[in-house]
Amino acid sequence: MGRAIRWGLVGLVALSAAWAATACSSGDSSKGAAAPATPDGAAIFAANCATCHATDGSGGQGPAIGDGAAAKDHSRAELVALVTHGKAAMPAWDKTLSTAEIAAVVDYVRTDLGKDAGTKTSTTSGSAAGRGSLSGIPPELRTTDGDWALANGDYASTRTVADPKITSKTVDDLKLAWTYDVPGGGTFGNLTTTPLVVGDSVYLGALTTKVHAIDRATGKERFTVGRDTSIFGPTGVGIGWGRLFGTTSNKAGKGSVLVAYSADDGRQLWATDLGENGGIINMQPTAYDGLVFASTSGYGNGTKATIYAVDAETGTIVWRFVVIADPGLWGHPELNSGGGVWYPPTIDTKRGIAYFGTGNPYPFPGTPGFPNGSSRPGDNKWTDSMVALDIETGKLVWGYQAIPHDLFDRDSMVSARVDTKVDGKDRSLAISTGKLGIVSALDADTGAVVWRRSVGKHQNDQLTSIDGPTLVYPGSLGGVQTPVAIADDTIYTCVMNAPAQYDGPEVTSFGFGVQLGTADSDMVAIDAATGKVKWDVKLPGDSFGGATVSGDLIFTSSFGGKILALDRTTGKTVWSYDAPGPINGWPAITGDELYVPVGMADPPQLLAFKLGG
């Protein structure tokens, strides 16, 4: 590639040497360039480190290092060496930061980072506290005619266009209509999201947590709102009842606040901090029945991922569901955490159930003195699971744990719904998949397993312990990383064949190396009724493009920067477009329009295509 880059997505912690030789971010400065007399350690941290470690150092895809944690575990000299030369998943910064800048950021981390992390941010409201009067399906979501108003297209998360105009007969007529720049971001780029297209506007949530409103016809900015706060995503914006729902930061700079803006002018209506159990909001919010669903994720500091239903009118928390079933965090709250929810739920409006996929327990594979996850004995429910929650109360209807006591970061974070015939009988299925590389069909009412299908390459992932260096497929960036699509009783899954090298049973996740650029990805078509594979085709290199169906086509993309359209019957590529940078987001398709976020372009940008230009 022309210039080395570092990027990320859900679960990203590192790039292999095949893809990156140096690290770059929005705050890069070249080695040898004249440094300021007194480098600003806080600014250097915010530009280069906050995406992984969180703005307040509370941790995320990087370990918790704020509020004195780094100074407790490492001497100043050790931290300087670590930042300078890197280790395992921690990149070396000696080619990016000067010696003085490294010293300044180390001193900031040791003495000032996160010292105000305990600051509370109260709920603010634009109306009286308590439940408001909103209910049912928001008006923006009552029709799919020409709009894409939900992150995954519809409440069933099928990512399928209801009235497609872009088909194999017309796809060659797609022309780039406009581009919209979304500056900012860091290690992960700035767009790991799906834009929303509603009426005459396109709404886009960025990894800076800013929300952009764009004129649909011209690509001109209508407004941009929000603080410049680094999160690692994926993220995005939800919509309902004239409100946009996104993420922003609290007074301590932590991206744990769910915020509502007016969809007309960006005016803030309310903001509610959901960070009581640690973590930040990385999930794209979803609105239904007067509620906004959001969740926290993150690791370290005893974080317990928590799913929230917040009143869409008032910002009041209506209910919460803590993913970690054991309030004592399996006996070691000082070490254990996890269960992050990264993607929006699938909502069954008839059953009144929201289906959420959850992430891994932490630490993994283990930590000093506690090999192979022994600091967290037992199954570690409800990590790596699908949880079906009653929409009105937040109570658990059923739970299905795909991986008990996970050692290898095998999130089961993707959900969808489909009705089909199984053995000649009508069945309602909840589809669960994720980084574990297994697609499961579960009874939508009970959670009983109907079928399970392994996809992609698997090696050592079923081990329940390791005793030394171990290569595992799928790794932390392997398996089904991105949303699936469902159409005509077929499930389309984009699968990553990327391994992770684990150093040993007492080394935390930041002692492993993710190996990208080692194999092509797969697009797999699975029969929804039986779990049988209809076809399996290779995609070029690493692909984080998900799957989106328009007519007889499946749209996806490659990290190499190609937008692809595949024939739904055969998987054959019938159309491609060279984007201006790597892609780690998912498109929106509305009739004759295609919107693709290109988060690693310079600058990051949204591409809008239209049939006929």
Image (tube, rainbow, N blue to C red):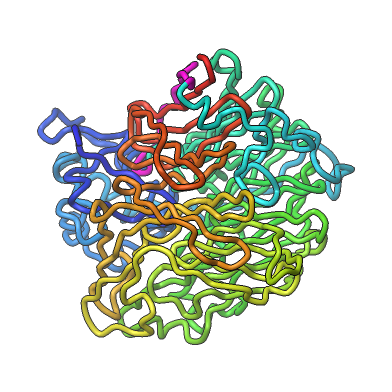
In this rendered view, identify the residue nearer to me: 145 or 44: 145
As drawn, is 88 to the left or to the right of 66? left
Residue 489, image x, y percentages: 63, 55
Please tell me whether residue 161 belongs to the stretch shown in magenta: no
Pick out the residue farthest to the left.
32
Residue 488, image x, y percentages: 64, 50
- Residue 160: in sight, yes or no? yes
Q: Residue at x 50, y 42 (%)?
A: 554
Segment colored magenta: 173-188
Q: Residue at x 45, y 56 (%)?
A: 535
In this rendered view, identify the residue nearer to me: 74 or 408: 408
On the rendered image, what quadrant is the N terminus found in? top left
Please tell me whether residue 184 belongs to the stretch shown in magenta: yes
Residue 217, image x, y percentages: 60, 15
Q: Is residue 246 above or below residue 596?
A: below
- Residue 68: in sight, yes or no? no
Q: Residue at x 19, y 56 (%)?
A: 86
Which image quarter: residue 416? bottom right
Q: Is residue 443 above or below residue 89?
A: below
In this rendered view, identify the residue nearer to me: 478 or 138: 478
Q: Is residue 370 above or below residue 609?
A: below
Which image quarter: residue 319? bottom right
Residue 512, image x, y percentages: 27, 66
Pick out the residue farthest to the right.
133
As drawn, is 153 to the left or to the right of 105? right
